[in-house]
Amino acid sequence: MSVRLTVARQTEADRDEVERAARGDDGHLLERHRLIVALADALMTQPGQIDDRLMADLRAHFTVDQLVEITLKTMKYNTQKVSVALGTDRAVTPDRIGQVRWNLDGTYVVAD
């Protein structure tokens, strides 16, 4: 599942909006939903280059606490990108999915 779709599902978006977001079609979205998708895209692609206009629009629609929550939810579903980019990720096959456990430091280990 894409981060875009996951974030859309956690907002007040209805089913049609979520399905359109999954296809990358955001022309029909309410302004606040379009802004959430824009922020999620920016965070996943170039987080250091989020433009002032997007930030001003986000601040006009959301509180600081809401922006922090949206950002953390987006990043929560995006953490695997670092290990994939470094080539250190380990494949977890469906037959072993129940054997994954989380360490106290937030990393996961495939149980033997």
Image (cartoon, helix red, strand yellow):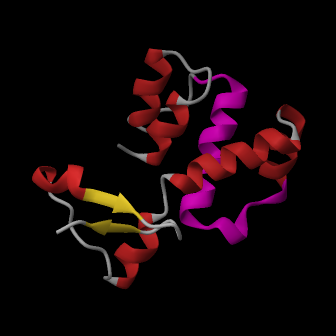
Q: Is residue 91 above or below residue 87?
A: above
Residue at the (43%, 68%) spot, across then down: 81
Most foreground residue, 23 or 84: 84
Residue at the (45%, 74%) spot, across then down: 82
Which residue lies most toward the left here?
95
Q: Is residue 34 above or below residue 41?
A: above
Most foreground residue, 82 or 61: 82
Image coords of residue 38 (percent x, y): 63, 46
Q: Is residue 103 above or below residue 20?
A: below
Image coords of residue 22 (percent x, y): 40, 35
Question: Which residues make up the magenta segment?
Answer: 29-52
Left or right for 75, reference 70: left
Image coords of residue 39 (percent x, y): 66, 49
Q: Is residue 44 above or below residue 97?
A: below
Figure quadrant of the C terminus: bottom left
Left or right for 40, reference 54: left
Counting every numbered tag in the picture gives 0
Image coords of residue 110 (percent x, y): 25, 66
Q: Quadrant of residue 85?
A: bottom left
Figure quadrant of the N terminus: top left
Q: Is residue 5 magenta?
A: no
Q: Main secondary structure of the magenta part?
A: helix
Most foreground residue, 51 or 84: 84
